[in-house]
Image: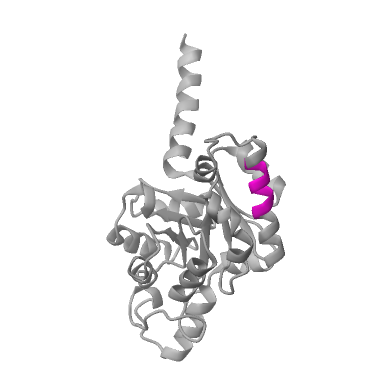
């Protein structure tokens, strides 16, 4: 069974870089991302409007190009998570995790016994249709799946220490926009209340020995997150990166033409 080099790198204290995909779900996307040096891609079911068929196809396209496919699901339910894993995702990000219980359930749903209680099924996309030895397959799958609670509400920050301490949680993700909105200071990232929440999040990750991940809207923002201690860095989305690069070039060309 294929390994998850992103999980291994983070566990070894390294930094990883990727992108979020919401719109340009072509057969060539993962190869393009791999050529650009992306180590992972997060397929966004929450805001991107994609369904499981699109996710399954993209996980297949990622299979042979070395990009780790992660998926942000739409909510906290077993039936929203297990099929995504069987479709080939190597990790699940759940939005708005607010309690230790939610984190424990998320971790359990993502792994087979004895670590969790994921339903057993082999010979499908997630094991490359090999139908291998079940016990060995369960162990290998448990080792490669990433469990990623998204902390993006005031309640989540209040419980962040307990959430990040849950066994089986691999990576804490900081949802800066929704968190600022939940705190009543939408997009005010320099506000003292937001900065205090950010510091508490990072301290909780460090105390639990878990890496921290975040999305940045541009190069300077990503550099800023990196300077604060984030090691799993997401450079925008397919839409934002393409649109920003195109607009910058066209603005320059139009300006030169007068």
Where is residue 200? Give x, y as percent. Answer: 67, 52
Residue 79, by quadrant, is bottom left
Residue 239 visible in the snapshot: yes
Instruction: Look at the picture and state if 2 lies above or below 236.
Output: below
Residue at horizontal 60 percent and vertical 59 percent from the top: 160
Start-end of magenta stretch: 194-201
Where is residue 150? Give x, y as percent. Answer: 51, 56
Instruction: Look at the picture and state if 196 lies above or below 151.
Output: above
Of 152 and 72, nearer the camera is 152
Where is residue 205? Give x, y as percent. Answer: 66, 60
Q: Is residue 62 left or right of residue 38?
A: left
Residue 191, by quadrant, is top right
Residue 225, by quadrant, is top right
Instruction: Look at the picture and state if 160 lies above or below 4.
Output: above
Q: Main secondary structure of the magenta part?
A: helix
Q: How many marks?
A: 0
Residue at horizontal 32 percent and vertical 61 percent from the top: 57
Residue at horizontal 38 percent and vertical 76 percent from the top: 128
Where is residue 226? Give x, y as percent. Answer: 67, 47
Of 167 and 102, nearer the camera is 102
Instruction: Look at the picture and state if 195 lies above or below 130.
Output: above
């Amino acid at each position: 069974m294929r390994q998850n080099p992103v999980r291994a790198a983070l566990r070894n204290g390294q930094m990883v870089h990727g992108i979020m995909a919401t719109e340009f779900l072509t057969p060539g996307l993962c190869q393009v991302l791999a050529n650009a040096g992306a180590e992972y891609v997060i397929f966004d079911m929450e805001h991107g409007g994609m369904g499981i068929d699109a996710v399954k196809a993209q996980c297949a396209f990622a299979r042979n190009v070395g990009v780790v496919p992660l998926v942000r699901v739409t909510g906290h339910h077993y039936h929203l998570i297990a099929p995504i894993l069987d479709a080939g995702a190597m990790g699940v990000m759940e939005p708005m995790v607010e309690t230790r219980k939610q984190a424990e359930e998320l971790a359990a749903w993502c792994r087979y016994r004895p670590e969790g209680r994921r339903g057993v099924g082999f010979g499908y996309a997630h094991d490359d249709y090999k139908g291998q030895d079940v016990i060995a397959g369960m162990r290998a799958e448990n080792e490669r799946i990433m469990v990623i609670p998204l902390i993006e509400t005031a309640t989540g920050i209040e419980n962040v220490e307990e959430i990040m301490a849950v066994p089986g949680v691999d990576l804490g993700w900081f949802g800066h926009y929704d968190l600022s909105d939940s705190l009543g200071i939408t997009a005010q990232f320099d506000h003292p209340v937001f900065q205090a929440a950010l510091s508490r999040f990072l301290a909780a990750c460090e105390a639990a020995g878990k890496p921290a991940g975040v999305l940045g809207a541009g190069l300077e923002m990503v550099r800023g997150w990196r300077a604060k201690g984030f090691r799993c860095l997401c450079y925008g989305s397919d839409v934002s990166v393409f649109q920003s690069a195109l607009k910058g070039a066209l603005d320059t060309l139009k300006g030169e033409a007068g």
